[in-house]
Amino acid sequence: MNDKPVVAVVGRPNVGKSTLFNRLVGGRVAIVEPEPGVTRDRIYREAEWNGREFVLVDTGGVVEEAANTIEAAIKKQVAQAIEEANLVLFVVDALAGVLPEDRAVAGILRRSGKPVLLIANKVDRFDPPPALGEFYALGMGEPLPVSAAQGLNTGDLLDTIVASLPAKKAVKKEGVALRVAVVGRPNAGKSSLVNAILGEERVIVSETPGTTRDAVDTPFERGERRYVLIDTAGIRRKGRTERGVEVLSVVMARKAIERAQVCLLVVDGSEGVTAQDAHVAGLIQEAGKGVVVVVNKADTLTREGKKRLLEDVEFKLKFLKDTPCLFVSALTGAGVGKLLPQALKVGENFQRRIGTGELNRVLRAAWESHPPPGGKGPAKLYYATQVGTAPPRFKLFTNLKGELHFSYLRFLENALRQAFPLAGVPVRFMIVGKP
């Protein structure tokens, strides 16, 4: 991300910033609702126009005077987005005209000294030309009319953005970034953990459940490796999810699991493993992703408490086979430094390829020591081959009819795990038998 120019989208609440953001990046990334204050954290996505790449940043709405801690935190997030931006898109509502909050945002931008494009959104007709004269009073130059909802004039906007960016830098080629999603139930400390990993206040932290709404991607580098860290909303069961924004938040969190390669499943150490933790773990398993169980708030646990909680993890999340479990404290930073190295190991296992000869040696030895039941004659394993990664997938050719029992597949999986580094990732089998 550091090699590409950054374009921040800012403005007061409900001027259509997230709608414009989604339009420019070409998909529904940020949650869009008529309710003010839906977007809270900075949301980053890469965009491209006419061969020029840049990073677009969506931000929360700026209010004149923060009425609560969330609004104050949003204002701080916006200030950070402006500080790192090469160009700012100042979005106003062409229908509502200039409001005091618009003047407040204009004052912030003037003091920043950053290049600004004034975007008059919600212009649904261009014949006759829209009357936008009052927006010149903001001192931000000529307003560019668009309709983010209908996509009107957004091509001209992208042309202007690209023309306003700094000269293109030579980009060094690097490996593919490891996508790591931080998931769990509400208030387990996910956002605090993201900030602790990054070493900065990247996402808003509050004791209020549901503070994080969008899935917030943060690309960064650590050593020679590239990562994308994805903070997500707390996942509740369907029956306990409110309507509107919260439902969309959970949908975005589930999509974040699908986009990730490795998930950090955050468990609240002060409460132990709950049924909801098991539900989230099931979503990860169903999606076929790598996983590390992260017990947060470990500073509240005694040595005996950690031992009991580890037993709780092994019992209640036993379907997550061979999964690493780390105890950390986002508050004190204890154990946080181990998370990325562990996620990297699981990511390597997620892409693991096993040589055909070694694979057949291990599986045949297990098969012959304990053949599966069924069939008129002896059960035979003719051949095994790996057919894919992410997660590792294997095809077994046998003389049997139908599928092997799940308990026998678990036996074969255990044999593979003992022989090869597959910690933290699911293993999938496909059985090819007699027609």
Image (spheres, grey):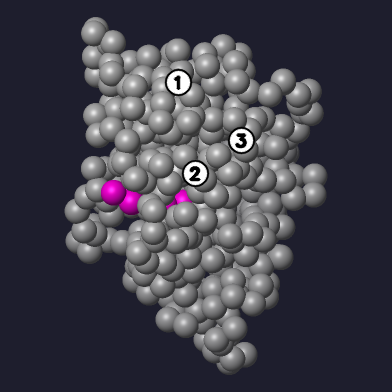
* Lower sequence index among marks 3 and 2: 2
Q: Reply yes or no: does residue 108 show up in magenta.
A: no
Quadrant where the C terminus is found in the figure: top left
Residue 175 can be seen, yes or no: yes
Residue under the point 63% across and 33% down: 86
Q: Amino acid at mark 3?
A: Lys
As drawn, which residue projects farthest toward the front?
Answer: 137
Look at mark 3 in the image and give the residue it sits on. 114
Q: Is residue 27 left or right of residue 116?
A: left
Question: In terms of image quadrants, where is residue 275?
Answer: bottom left
Look at mark 1 in the image and give the residue it sits on. 142
**Rendering coords of residue 149 (x, y %):** 29, 26
Tag 3–tag 1 contact (CB < 8 Å): no
Q: Is residue 340 left or right of residue 195?
A: right
**Region in magenta:** 36-41
Residue under the point 59% across and 91% down: 302
Main secondary structure along the magenta-highlighted residues? loop
Residue under the point 43% across and 75% down: 273
Residue 323 circle label:
none
Helix, strand or loop at disc 3? loop
Q: Is residue 176 above or below residue 105?
A: above
What separation in Å lies between label 1 and label 2 (alpha carbons)? 17 Å
Q: Amino acid at mark 2?
A: Gly
Q: Is residue 130 above or below residue 245?
A: above
Residue 107 circle label:
2
Q: Amino acid at mark 1?
A: Glu
Residue under the point 22% across and 64% down: 240
> Within 10 Å of the Cα at label 3, are there few (<14), some (14-19), or many (20+) other Cα atoms?
some
Task: Count the marks.
Answer: 3
